[in-house]
């Protein structure tokens, strides 16, 4: 008897709503981008410069630990040759002959100007935005809860709405994840499972006799009192 109770306790609880199941699968695919940034097959890593994945994992706009007392100690620079963490403007004196880039902020997310990053990286297929009269791209994904109405194009990784059909990704991180062979295979499997599950919108319940009777007896219009004679 005790064994039966234990089996009932550990029984897997599956969601009844098919829409919830699909959203869970989309979340799993989106999480793949973060797992991919932490490592991957050697063949995949050789497709990108060695500084790219360390760059996307850094936390910028923190105070420099070497120049704490300076008012210019905010770390918004990065050295592509050293890849030893974010730098402040005072740290650049030790990186004179190195390739350095500046990270900027937009809506609490890290961005980089197109004219800086395109010197060292192919950013084709990534959505660009104009901020302070300059084109920028986001470093990492910014998932949306759901696409807006009438949306025809979204990021292949995090499903964020893209304003132009010529783009496939919303950020550098999404391009890395979405361009890997493992991601494409997982995405195809997800689409196949979604098609097999059919429509996940609940059907309209049939009209019963009691409900139709209530509709027939419903009074129409606003009642008015008879005029006083």
Image (tube, grey):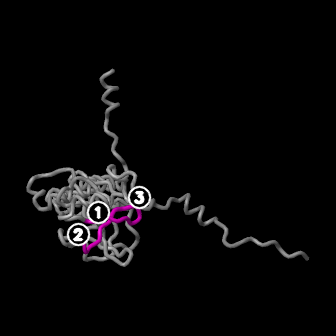
Q: Mark 1–mark 2 contact, CB under 8 Å?
A: no
Q: Choose between 135 and 196: the one closer to the eye.
A: 135
Q: Choose between 164 and 59: the one closer to the eye.
A: 59
**Residue 139 percent across, percent down from the top left:** 29, 63
Residue 130 falls in which quadrant of the image?
bottom left
Per the model, the C-alpha gap separating discs 1 and 3 is: 26 Å
Give SS at disc 1. Answer: loop
Query: In the rendered image, which quarter contains the C terminus?
Result: bottom right
Which circle, 2 or 3, is nearer the viewer?
3
Which mark is on residue 139?
Answer: 1
**Residue 4 percent across, percent down from the top left:** 31, 25
Q: Which residues are magenta?
A: 101-117
Which class describes the residues within 10 Å of circle 3: few (<14), some (14-19), or many (20+)?
Answer: few
On whether residue 110 falls in the magenta region, the answer is yes
Q: Which residue is mark 3?
A: 71
Which class describes the residues within 10 Å of circle 2: few (<14), some (14-19), or many (20+)?
Answer: some
Q: Which residue is mark 2?
A: 117
């Amino acid at each position: 008897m005790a064994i039966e109770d234990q089996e009932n306790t550990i029984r897997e609880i599956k969601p009844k709503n098919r829409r919830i199941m699909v959203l869970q699968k989309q979340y799993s695919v989106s999480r793949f981008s973060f797992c991919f940034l932490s490592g991957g097959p050697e063949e995949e890593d050789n497709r990108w410069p060695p500084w790219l994945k360390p760059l996307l994992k850094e936390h910028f706009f923190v105070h420099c630990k070497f120049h704490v007392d300076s008012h210019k100690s905010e770390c918004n620079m990065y050295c592509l040759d050293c890849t030893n963490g974010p730098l402040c403007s005072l740290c650049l004196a030790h990186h004179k002959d190195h390739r350095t880039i500046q990270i900027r902020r937009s809506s609490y997310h890290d961005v980089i100007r197109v004219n800086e990053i395109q010197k060292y990286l192919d950013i084709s297929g990534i959505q660009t935005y104009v901020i302070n009269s300059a084109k920028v791209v986001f470093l990492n994904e910014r998932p949306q809860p759901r696409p807006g109405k009438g949306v025809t194009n979204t990021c292949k990784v995090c499903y964020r709405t893209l304003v132009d059909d010529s783009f496939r990704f919303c950020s550098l991180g999404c391009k890395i994840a979405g361009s890997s062979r493992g991601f494409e295979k997982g995405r195809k499997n997800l689409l196949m499972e979604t098609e097999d599950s059919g429509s996940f919108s609940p059907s309209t319940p049939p009209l019963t006799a009691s409900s139709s009777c209530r509709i027939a007896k419903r009074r129409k219009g606003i009642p008015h009192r008879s005029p006083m004679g």
